[in-house]
């Protein structure tokens, strides 16, 4: 049985990856320190014979006895408000954490796939974003801690690949959504859905003309799975090119949730990218992959998930004072 270590296992993407690899017949070792992850995302795996969980902060040395075939590095805060709240941890997990995992991959002769991001393109001057675009990132802005950690992560991964011959894969993930996102993590889909469920107005940042392209989690996981088993070590974009303005998206959410909420406008956070759309030509060609789930279906499934959360979760406000974080 092949063994895979998944960091960030209690997070949104990490937990879906645990499920997928178990389904595919792997032995999965999940690792998380719960800084942004949640035990409930992996609770259903607790007693599974092919699942083991280790609570550990990967910015510290990782002791692991036994063999490993694959490592998937999905540990990181992933919401702009998290970066502002825990900036040092965000930098450390992308840099020191990745370094530790590369060392582990080298020692175990395991293949390592790292989760990179569309944020490496910053506020892009090229549209849609191809893997060849070097990006437009403000190193010292509030998002810089995430963007630069992820850029460093790509660099050190390529260095270990070239210098030490470690087998590596790099996925550049574009906005992905689905069940198990944190309702109050501040990102736009949980934010709008939480607001709709609580009967609050939907907060659009800026004029709402900024765009994003949202990928359903199952499509994302499929792309990552295929990339891991490809023989391509340079970065690959995985996302859904179906682009929408945040303003139109708010209208879609109001229709979907059948609420009568208004939208209200807030200041656009500093360095908030104005447009984002993945060019997935490479993934299509290389992996024979493209997203299959319509936004309509994906959002319906996601809304059902949020609807079933308890009132305690619904009203828990992790980022109650988030407007303080986004002030210029
Ligand atoms: N956004 C918004 N209202 C919210 C939360 C986010 O208008 O309550 C906007 C945000 O300014 C950004 C987009 O939605 O332009 C996507 O934000 P998110 O935090 O989900 O992720 P990002 O793609 O910026 O990393």
Image (spheres, rainbow, N blue to C red):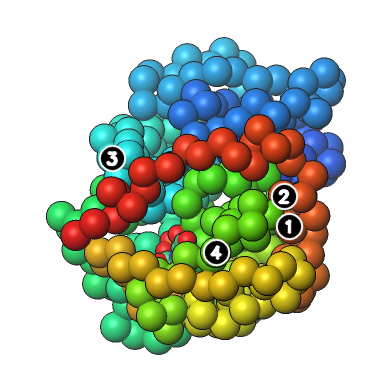
Q: Which residue is mark 1?
A: 302
Q: CA distance from mark 1 to mark 2?
A: 6 Å
Q: Mark 1, residues whose alpha carbon is within 10 Å: few (<14), some, or many (≥20)?
A: many
Q: Which residue is mark 2?
A: 306
Q: CA distance from mark 4 to mark 1?
A: 19 Å
* Contact, mark 1 vs mark 3 (Cβ under 8 Å): no
Q: Earlier in the sequence, mark 3 or mark 2?
A: 3
Residue drawn 37% across the image and 36% down it: 93
Position of residue 82 measured from the top left corner of the image (x, y, whole percent): 39, 43
Residue labelled 4 has its Cβ within 8 Å of some atom of ligand 1: no
Position of residue 201 measured from the top left corner of the image (x, y, whole percent): 55, 64
Residue drawn 46% across the image and 29% down it: 35
| As drawn, 102 above or below 240 | above
Q: Which residue is mark 3?
A: 87
Q: Mark 2, residues whose alpha carbon is within 10 Å: few (<14), some, or many (≥20)?
A: many
Which quadrant of the figure contains the C terminus?
A: bottom left
Q: Is residue 63 left or right of residue 256?
A: left
Res 172 visible = no
* Contact, mark 3 vs mark 4 (Cβ under 8 Å): no
């Amino acid at each position: 049985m092949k063994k895979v270590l998944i960091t960030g296992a209690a997070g949104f993407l990490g937990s879906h990856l645990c499920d997928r690899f178990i389904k595919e017949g792997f032995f999965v070792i999940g690792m998380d320190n719960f800084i942004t992850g949640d035990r409930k995302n992996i609770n259903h795996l607790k007693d599974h014979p092919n699942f083991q969980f280790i609570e550990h902060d990967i910015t510290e040395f990782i002791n692991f006895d036994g063999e490993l075939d694959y490592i998937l590095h999905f540990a990181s805060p992933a919401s702009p408000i998290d970066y502002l709240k825990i900036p040092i941890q965000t930098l450390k997990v992308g840099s020191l954490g990745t370094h530790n995992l590369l060392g582990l991959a080298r020692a175990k002769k395991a293949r390592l796939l790292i989760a990179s991001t569309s944020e490496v393109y910053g506020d892009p001057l090229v549209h849609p974003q191809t893997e060849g675009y070097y990006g437009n990132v403000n190193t010292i802005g509030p998002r810089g801690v995430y963007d630069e950690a992820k850029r460093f992560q790509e660099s050190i991964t390529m260095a270990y690949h070239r210098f030490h011959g470690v087998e590596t894969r790099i996925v550049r993930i574009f906005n992905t959504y689905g069940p198990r996102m944190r309702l109050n993590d501040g990102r736009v889909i949980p934010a709008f859905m939480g607001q709709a469920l609580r009967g609050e107005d939907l907060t659009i940042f800026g004029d709402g003309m900024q765009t994003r392209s949202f990928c359903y989690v199952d499509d994302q996981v499929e792309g990552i799975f295929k990339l891991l088993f490809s023989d391509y070590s340079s970065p690959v974009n995985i996302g859904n090119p179906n682009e929408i303005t945040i303003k139109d998206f708010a209208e879609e959410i109001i229709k979907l949730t059948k609420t009568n909420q208004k939208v209200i406008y807030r200041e656009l956070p500093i360095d908030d990218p104005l447009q984002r759309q993945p060019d997935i030509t490479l993934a299509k060609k290389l992996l024979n992959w493209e997203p299959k789930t319509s936004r309509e279906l994906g959002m319906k499934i996601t809304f059902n998930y949020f609807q079933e959360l308890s009132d305690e979760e619904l009203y828990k406000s992790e980022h109650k004072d988030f407007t303080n974080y986004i002030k210029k």
